[in-house]
Image: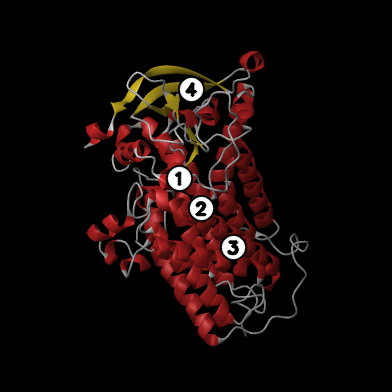
Amino acid sequence: MWDWFSAPGYWAARFAVQHLLAVAYLVAFASALRQFRGLLGERGLTPIPRYLARVPFRGAPSLFHLHYSDRLFAGVCWVGIAGSVLALVVDFAPLWAWIVLWLLLWLLYLSIVNVGQVWYSFGWESLLLEAGFLAIFLGPGSLAPPAPVLWLLTWLLFRVEFGAGLIKLRGDSCWRDFTALYYHHETQPMPGPLSRSFHLLPRPLHKVEVAANHGTQLVVPFVLFAPQPAATVAALVVVATQGWLMLSGNFAWLNWLTITLAFSAMGSWLLRWVTPEPPPPAAPPPWFVAAVLVVAVVFVVLSYWPVRNMLGRRQVMNRSFNRLHLGNTYGAFGSVTRTRYEVIIEGAAAPNGEWLAYEFKGKPGDPHRRPPQVAPYHLRLDWLMWFLAISPSYGRSWLPNLVEALLRNEEHVLRLLRHNPFPESPPRLVRAQFYRYRFATRAEHRETGAYWIRSRIGDFVPPLTLEDLE
């Protein structure tokens, strides 16, 4: 009776999507727990209470409109972590319990994202929420995966890849002349341990990388909707490409989520190694069938806005068209910066004292430090520092507060950094210097041990004291 609704041949695909998505939720809630006090807490750089005072519930639906405290935010994170672990280990559960668990994860993370302000303005936040909402209706292992939900997950993957491909072709000539990766590995927001090696590859290989990217994002997404085994092959191409991106840089959980979505298009004939075949599934209850069909219709309607955006001449990246972050548009690096700039923050104990640099956990600073592996964890302040180097306007809401926090040695803010050169007492002055960075050549690295070569451009923020800020 339910042959048209169920997809029993995708039981392993559902298993993979469920578990990879649970890991993404786990990382997201852990990231929020470790960083929120310095970024968003009552004494953070952009405090949530101030935001809630000027933005109504309709403008940012969140549980925190009922009440906010740092203790409550931490509690939400811990509940999200526990729920993510539960979703990771529980495969068989009553249908109602499955729905409640995944709905809870979605509601909690939506509440965080909608008060996260500039720190949560990245595309992978909306991608996690959209994929997480669809996971509510995937159902437990006792039921066959619902085909409409698998199609919606594949459609989401299509929008992620095809939208990213279109924005590259439209946004920057270097994608059209195949020179984008002459620069990207060096100028990307958060280089990883292998980024320098990728950057130093011969330029003809960089052109091959761009060509492969265009093929994966502009051609392969259409094959995801083809009959098997073509759809599985297309999904494997996506997985391989995302794995390459994970090796070449730190993009939080964007690549992880894209790989997660790719599994929704893979037949269980390939994924039998993932999990044993379950017993014959039970028939889905009529109310569940009706709920899935309603969700499918809603997403068809919501798809109008991202499709219009992709087909329009003024395509934008990473836009949510509603406050629930459903039916979003995606994309990355529609323009590629040719030169890397860094803002280096320094402090001095006295007006004529030595200037000492604050080191960040992920972003380039000390030229002799190799870029670390961070992803899928997301260092939010480090990412915003990359945007700050592009334009001071990106720091308008938080940079003055960061300077003040350093002048006061605010503990919660200092925890966002790797090294505080003034552990005993706060500095008298803080300034920010502007540098140009480039990767060291192989010869320069052998001679100096440096991974970066930098040259000072000038002041970004002049020396300031607490009295200056007041």
First of labels 4, 1 by sequence position: 1
Residue, disc 4: 437
Dot 2: within a 10 Å radius of its alpha carbon, few (fewer than 14), some, or many (20 or more) residues? some
Amino acid on which disc 2 is placed: Ser
Amino acid on which disc 3 is placed: Ala
Secondary element at tag 3: helix
Name the mark on residue 31.
Answer: 2
First of labels 1, 3 by sequence position: 3
> Residue 92 is drawn in which quadrant?
bottom right
Q: Alpha-carbon distance for marks 1 and 2?
A: 9 Å
Cβ atoms at labels 2 and 4 below 8 Å apart? no
Which residue appears at 36% of the width and 63% of the height? 69
Cβ atoms at labels 1 and 3 below 8 Å apart? no
Residue, disc 3: 22
Name the mark on residue 380.
Answer: 1
Amino acid on which disc 4 is placed: Tyr
Cβ atoms at labels 1 and 2 below 8 Å apart? yes
> Percent position (x, y) of residue 166?
46, 42
